[in-house]
Image (tube, coloured by chain):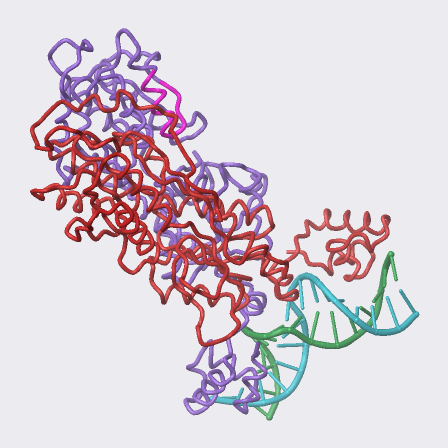
Chain colours: A purple, B red, C green, D cyan
DNA sequence: CTGAAAGCGCTAACAC
DNA sequence: GTGTTAGCGCTTTCAG
């Protein structure tokens, strides 16, 4: 591999001139530049980035810690992050952490090892020692640490869950089941709180029996629904804290011979592409997934390059996206006599009805 | 940030000894090692990876080029790759290329720039100049270049599509629609060829009118199905070249009031997690997605470290996974009179029936 | 076993 | 504008 000295020799100039031609061409005379560029071409020269980075103490790498890349929401976040990084001349070091702290710490430490300039963490865990005052550049997006010290990009999960629950209440539901996300996640906690707040506001007594644990997996939704519909006094609506669980629940409910939304309404959270296409199409909360990634990258780069960030805590907007899986509580008896619900999807439209309940703040 | 000299001073040894203690401890006396380790601790020393890599001309980074990370199949591949990379002490530089060649080239060139040791390409495009004999370490997985010069990990897409088509033929179908993937993809071409081969073998004349273009998106399946079911002599079965399109097709078919599989069987390819959970559960071809990523990383590392690879072209096994979306062609008239199909899913089982049609070769 | 010393390829003062 | 030169932090001969 040719190096800068080789090019300098070929061009009949010094290595400094070659370096300058590449980094700050304005400081070099046109004629010299041409000579250098010709030599670069001739030698097939490519700057050794390891050397450049080593010397200039800047890697242009960003570590991104994602709990589970196979999750379609996170896949969209990463896609947005990658686009923004590329646009700004940065690269993404991806780590699928499975939510394991030791792996998160290990990758975050690449910053200490001068292998990356900053970290994006998509989970509510601080991978840096909390006893030290200053940390390397880090941005916390999606699931954010409560009262954390880092920049954050998040959704108002409380407001979103409250809006969704209110929507169900407005449809006449009073017995609304909930399938939660992982217990320890602040995101889950906020959504639960929003759900409770809406019930409370409507004067509905909370029944802990219809609140199930889940983990955002299809299976958890399936199993949560199994429990709920087996109850003698089963809920007339079911709020799943993400779309995967809602889809799992749909399957279980249909297997039992009940109809959605006639017998039971089901709603989700995230608006994954499939929410459109499942049967019936899912009423859910749309999140700007790509914008999480994009904003996180932009804020992190500002941090790294010591440019100001307009706000330390960005809240992205959500949209209550109304489709066919939630409907007004049926007036009739809610017994389980079989009826023909096969035409549920006849009215399905490809264009979702959306409404934005509140602006971002 | 402390450096090796600082540690050497603290330990009262030379920098060489510190370096050796870290890299090849066997060459250092125990007592000296202890001194050094204590000094490392005391100084909070972390080797500057930029310097290490610069000096030793090895980055432990692998570039992975993925056409679309939001695709759940690729997300699983990456997940497998990440695990394998981590286990081997390598890191993954992720690039979502959107299938754009200039971006693929740009990232692949990070190898020339000593920013990565090798490349994994998940698309049938050679990002390196083809006129040069030797290329940097690269492995081509999932969608592989025909007669390419690189190591490959692939599925026998021809055999898989043939097996699936034969399955439909065995169920009594003779008019089998096809929704293809992107025209230019070899993967699509192989699957089409497998489909044609099965029809030919069964003595069924191919009707080009029931072969639709698609692009692996939900929407393409939806639209392809719309075209096919509008035909006066519509197919009794529909083979979609991936699961997303099959799910899109399911939606359109159900909207039209037809039942799956009673009126029309629908099958997919990939076995994404949702294939289990859609309605009806999808008969499909299971691919070992994580194994693609894992194998690609392992072979690439062998290439980089100049260890032998047992085979240059690895073929991973597929499984025909039978669920409820495909059934024997109904004997009755295939008119479109409405009937109750709402109980389709009653018989759905969570445990798929799988069969392996042939061993990997 | 350990130390001295020569760079890896590049950038950035500092001279000219 | 351009050249000279001193390192960045580390590994790795080569001596001892």
Q: Main secondary structure of the magenta part?
A: helix
Q: Is residue A142 left or right of residue B25?
A: left
Kindly identify the residue that appears in the image at 19 percent across and 27 percent down: A325
> Where the C terminus of chain A falls, by quadrant?
top left
Q: Nearer the viewer, residue B120 or B333?
A: B333
Q: Nearer the viewer, residue B138 or B204?
A: B204
User: Quick check: B56 above or below A109?
Assistant: below
Asked if the stretch drawn in magenta spans residue B350, the answer is no
Q: Which residues are magenta?
A: A212-226
Q: From the top left corner, tell me how far across and down residue B176 is, in percent.
A: 21, 43
Kindly identify the residue that appears in the image at 12 percent across and 37 percent down: A349
Answer whether residue A283 is visible to the viewer in this image: no
Asked if the stretch drawn in magenta spans residue A213, the answer is yes
Q: Is residue B208 left or right of residue A307?
A: left
Answer whether residue A65 is visible to the viewer in this image: yes
Q: Is residue B51 left or right of residue A319?
A: right
Indicate the quadrant where residue A69 lies: top left
Q: From the top left corner, tell me how far across and down residue A304 is, in percent.
A: 46, 56
Q: From the top left corner, tell me how far across and down residue B100 is, in percent.
A: 33, 62
């Amino acid at each position: 591999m040719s190096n800068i000295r080789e090019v300098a020799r070929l061009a009949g100039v010094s290595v400094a001139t070659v370096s300058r031609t590449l980094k700050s061409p304005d400081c070099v005379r046109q004629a010299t530049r041409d000579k250098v560029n010709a030599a670069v071409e001739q030698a097939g020269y490519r700057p050794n980035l390891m050397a450049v980075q080593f010397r200039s103490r800047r890697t242009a790498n960003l570590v991104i810690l994602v709990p589970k890349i196979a999750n379609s929401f996170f896949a969209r976040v990463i896609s947005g992050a990658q686009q923004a990084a590329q646009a700004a001349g940065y690269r993404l070091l991806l780590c699928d952490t499975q939510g394991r702290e030791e792996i998160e710490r290990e990758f975050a430490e690449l910053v200490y090892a001068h292998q990356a300039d900053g970290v994006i963490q998509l989970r509510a865990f601080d991978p840096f020692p909390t006893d030290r005052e200053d940390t390397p550049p880090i941005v916390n997006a999606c699931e954010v640490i409560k009262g954390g010290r880092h920049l954050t990009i998040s959704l108002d999960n409380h407001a979103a869950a409250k809006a969704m629950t209110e929507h169900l209440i407005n449809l006449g539901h009073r017995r609304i089941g909930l399938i939660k996300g992982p217990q320890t996640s602040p995101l889950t906690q906020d959504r639960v709180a929003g759900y409770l707040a809406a019930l409370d506001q409507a004067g509905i007594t909370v029944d802990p029996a219809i609140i199930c644990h889940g983990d955002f997996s299809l299976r958890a939704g399936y199993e949560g629904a199994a429990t709920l519909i087996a109850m003698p006094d089963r809920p007339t609506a079911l709020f799943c804290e993400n779309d995967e669980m809602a889809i799992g629940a749909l399957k279980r409910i249909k297997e039992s011979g009940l109809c959605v939304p006639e017998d039971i309404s089901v709603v989700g959270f995230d608006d994954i592409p499939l929410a459109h296409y499942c049967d019936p199409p899912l009423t859910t909360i749309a999140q700007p997934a790509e914008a999480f990634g994009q904003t996180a990258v932009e804020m992190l780069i500002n941090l790294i390059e010591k440019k100001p960030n307009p706000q330390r805590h960005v809240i992205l907007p959500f949209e209550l996206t109304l489709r066919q899986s939630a409907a007004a509580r049926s007036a009739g008896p809610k017994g389980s006599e079989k009826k023909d619900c096969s035409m549920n999807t006849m009215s399905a439209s490809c264009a979702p009805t959306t409404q934005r309940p509140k602006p971002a703040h």
